[in-house]
Image (cartoon, rainbow, N blue to C red):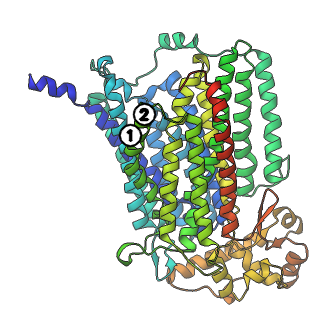
Amino acid sequence: MDTVVQSKTKHPKGLWVLFGTEMWERFNFYGMRAILTLFMVNALRLGESNASIIYGGFLALCYLTPLLGGFIADKFLGNRYCILLGGTLMAVGQFLLFYSATIFDTGLETSKIAFWLGLLVIIFGNGFFKPNISSMVGSLYPAQEKSKLDSAFTIFYMGINIGALLSQYFVPIIADVVVDGQRDIFVFKWGYLAAGIAMVLGTLIFLFLKDKYVVDPEGKPIGGLPSKSRNKEEEGEKAKFSSASLGITVGLFVVLFFVFRYLHVNEVFFSKFEIGSLVKGIIYPIIYASGISLAILILLDKALTKIEIQRILVIYIVSFFIIFFWAAFEQAGSSLTFIADNQTDRTFLFGWKMPASMVQIFNGLFVVILAVPFSLLWDKLRAKGKEPVSPLKQAMGLALIALSYFIIAYNVKDLGNSGLLAIKWLVLLYFIQTCGELCLSPIGLSLVGKLSPKRFASLLYGVFFISNAAGYALAGTLGSILPATGDKFIASEKQGIDLQAVLDKKYDVSGKELFILAQYDLAKIDKEKLDKTGIKLNEAIEKNNKTINKIKKADKKAEVKPEQLTYLSEPELSKLKSDNIITVEYNRFAGFTIHNLFEFFMVFVVLCGIAAVILALISPILKKMMHGVK
């Protein structure tokens, strides 16, 4: 009798198989993510602006491809094969990044090719893996035990948090090493290797244990090949659109693509092939245009009732405002990591200096600590009839993230070019942002599910996911306007150049000095003008990069002196200046010049603050438009 009762109260062993698989997958993803931008800047020498743009595009695509992976699983391969395929692809991608980080000092171009290929493989691997493993959890339980699903998903998501926390601690320890103020750029490879091994381990756990444990209550395998009869039944529940509606949508997508392309790279056609321009001019416009086009397509259905239209509009409004939250929140892997690296005193407990890439760990820690208290808070407010409606919760999340950046802005205001931000302020920022995340993040998918007409559920989830992807894309754009931090002024000073005087146009910089600033990613290069001159500037910079890497490999503490670099001829250097091919200027956003870190952080305060106020004010209207859905 006791044995029977015990078996009924326990979770199925399949849950722990999925737990372990997901834990190691998250170790793989967050470990790679922790060092991604630092590797791009310090080893591949892509520059902070390009690194932020690429990082935003990478995350955006990682949020889009699960739509494709879920579709392929439902129609063709099933959950099991997609998980194995996704895990294998992600492991291969990590090993390509490992290869890139191994050869960059001797073959930079080959290293970059391996890097791009690795990211692409990881994007598609994530698309196959991410939507399929979580969808299998519910199938482990019989109908009479569905009450266990809340605790089951709590356990499952704990696997996500544990994997993320472990990776954000151990990967920086082995792959983000700074000795006597000098970064060891040759250890990034160990982080990617650890991430790849973790993914192999997670995939093997699933491969060998799925048949025995990942089964339904009757012992039948879960997530096999999709049933044709089931697909026919589901087909009747899906939306169908007229040829005219589809034609309008395709036309709108094309127009919007080129509009967003022009807004991002100031051209309609294709003449700029620098990596940052490619990401901004192709990936970002696809994301923005597809979100708007899909949203319009749904509204073109004439069978929609007035109540359905209003509920769908609530989803659109919520999806729009969520873009600003993720754009601010996802600075963690780009601009906030650069600031932690270059202008923060990271001395933590007992005098230990925390690696810059590890500072992100506080978000995961606070999620683990605060998730249950926040859940209890909402339950208590609900019991009293005082729980805020979902849009108001989202407004609270936006307000909190605006507050976090206001506090940081205030504390960097007087740092100047050489002052260091105390790490406690970044810890506080992550604490406040985590509170904002717990106000906003859990409600999104739930709200879409409650408000969507059944035949449009999949498409409206698509709109919501695309809005998240748009937030990551905007995060890349905003991260790219980060102004020069203290390390840039120190680096230019070592080369005998006063960067502040150059930025303020108080010093007439020479062509040779402009070349040096471009070499260290302290100046902007007009690729279009450069191509017309025939000057081999990029080749000279790449040659110097090899020299710098060789010097650093021989002596990690060595300082590269100006006379150790190879320069262009005097006429070529003069032309670089006279034709404004290389320029040194402040970044701009929406017509405003960003002079310093204070103004940079205030961009997020203004964007998220205004969004929070507007959403809070219209929340009563949205509540009415939800027609009783809570």
Q: Of 94 and 425, which appears nearest the observer?
A: 425
225 versus 93 height, above or below: above
Which percent across, then down, holds residue 416? Answer: 65, 79
Q: Work out whether residue 99 can be spotted.
A: no
Q: Residues within 10 Å of mark 1 (few under 14, many from 20)?
A: few
Q: Amino acid at mark 2?
A: Ser
Which percent across, then down, holds residue 142? Answer: 31, 19
Secondary element at image label 1: helix
Q: Amino acid at mark 1?
A: Leu
Q: Which mark is residue 16?
A: none
Which percent across, then down, holds residue 350? Answer: 35, 76
Q: Of 110 and 519, which appears nearest the observer?
A: 519
Residue most toward the right?
Answer: 578
Secondary element at image label 2: helix
561 versus 42 height, above or below: below
Q: Quadrant of residue 603?
A: bottom right
| Residue, disc 1 | 376
Q: Of 607 and 10, which appears nearest the observer?
A: 607
Side (left or right) of 622 relative to 530: left
Q: Which mark is residue 134?
A: 2
Disc nearest the viewer among 2 and 1: 1
617 versus 214 height, above or below: below
Side (left or right) of 584 relative to 575: left
Q: CA distance from mark 2 to mark 1?
A: 24 Å
Q: Quadrant of residue 391?
A: top right
